[in-house]
Each structure stands twice: as structure tokens, then as C-alpha cells.
């Protein structure tokens, strides 16, 4: 038996590698377009950028301090709280997909989960962790 061919159930010979030709063609065209765009950009793109384009740029205004400046702890606290609440909400998606099979038990469990999430949010809010001066 040849690696490039296999016997079909009806006895006809099927060329297996020929079925991969569209994928190979797609990869070749994508690679060609990528290389062509890089070459055209280097040929026709600007060679001497202006001083403004070479200047440091951050958040719409020029940098005014050292890149190693200290951030307020509240910045990290709000970032961590966002990640926690965002990941907890991500658990709702699989629950919604299998909601029909879980029935009332799944509804009660998700109600407890959302209730704990709301209690955590209220606790964080009352502690003042979401306030920014």
C-alpha cells in the first residue's frame, strides 16, 4: 500500500494527499501576501520619520516622569478586583449552555453563586475599595 493512496470502501483508489492541496494552496497564498506586503512597505514607506514620530508617546501626552515610577496601591487593587469579578462572571457562560440539563438544582446553585458574588461586591463597595480620589 502506498502512503499517498488508500483503498476506498467501494474499491476505488483515493489520493489522500490531494485532499490537502487546498490547505497547502491557502498557506502558500497567505505567505506570499505577507511577504509581498512587507516588501512593498519597505520599498514605498517613509525612510526618514519626523522627530515627532520618534518621540516617546504614552496615553495621548508626552512622558513626564521616569518609567519606573511607583503606582498607587489602589490601582492594583481595582485591577485585581476587576479580574476576580470578571472571572466569576465567566463561570456563568458554561452554566447557561447546560442550563436545560441542570434543572432546578442548577438554578439554585447559580443563585447561590450570584448571591455570593453580589455580597462580595457590596463588601468591597462598603470598604471603599472602588473609590478613587
Image: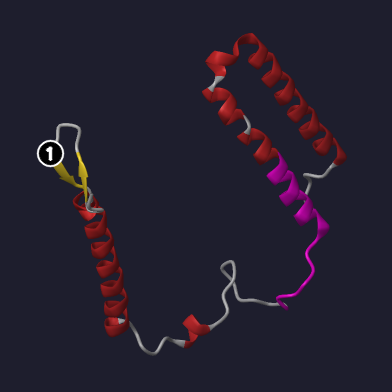
Which quarter of the figure has residue 102?
top right
Look at mark 1 in the image and give the residue it sits on.
12
Q: Residue furthest top?
A: 104
x, y percent for residue 33? 26, 67
Front residue of 73 and 64:
73
Q: Is residue 75 in the magenta section?
A: yes
Q: State left or right for residue 111 relative to residue 60.
A: right
Rendered residue at 54%/82% (across/down): 55
Image location of residue 95, percent across then percent down: 59, 24
- The answer to which image quadrant residue 74 occupies is bottom right
Q: Nearer the viewer, residue 72 or 23?
A: 23
Q: Residue 81: image x %, image y %?
A: 74, 44
Give the quarter of the image for residue 112: top right
Q: Is residue 45 magenta?
A: no
Where 17 sits versus 66, above or below?
Answer: above
Name which residue lies at 61% across and 35% down. Answer: 90
Task: Please tell me whether mark 1 sits on a helix, a strand or a loop.
Answer: loop
Of residues 67 and 15, the one drawn nearer to the viewer in this rendering = 15
- Above or below, 21 relative to 82: below
**The magenta segment:** 66-84
Number of marks in picture: 1
Q: Residue furthest left?
A: 12
Q: Main secondary structure of the magenta part?
A: helix
- Residue drawn at x 26%, y 78% is 40
Q: In the image, is residue 61 above or below residue 90? A: below
Q: Residue furthest right?
A: 127
- Camera-nearest residue between 119 and 90: 90
> Taking 51 as reference, is 70 left or right?
right
Q: Residue at x 23, y 63 (%)?
A: 29
Query: x and y percent of residue 96 in the render?
Result: 55, 23
Amino acid at each position: 500500500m502506498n502512503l499517498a493512496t488508500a483503498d476506498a470502501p467501494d474499491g476505488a483508489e483515493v489520493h489522500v494527499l490531494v485532499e490537502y492541496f487546498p490547505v497547502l494552496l491557502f498557506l502558500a497564498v497567505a505567505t506570499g501576501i505577507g511577504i509581498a506586503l512587507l516588501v512593498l512597505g519597505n520599498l514605498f514607506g517613509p525612510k526618514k520619520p519626523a522627530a515627532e514620530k520618534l518621540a516617546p508617546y504614552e496615553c495621548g501626552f508626552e512622558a513626564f516622569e521616569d518609567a519606573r515610577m511607583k503606582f498607587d496601591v489602589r490601582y492594583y487593587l481595582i485591577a485585581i478586583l476587576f479580574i476576580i469579578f470578571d472571572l466569576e462572571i465567566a463561570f456563568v457562560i458554561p452554566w447557561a449552555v447546560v442550563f436545560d440539563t441542570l434543572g432546578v438544582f442548577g438554578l439554585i446553585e447559580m443563585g447561590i453563586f450570584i448571591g455570593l458574588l453580589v455580597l462580595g461586591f457590596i463588601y468591597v463597595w462598603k470598604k471603599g475599595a472602588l473609590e478613587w480620589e
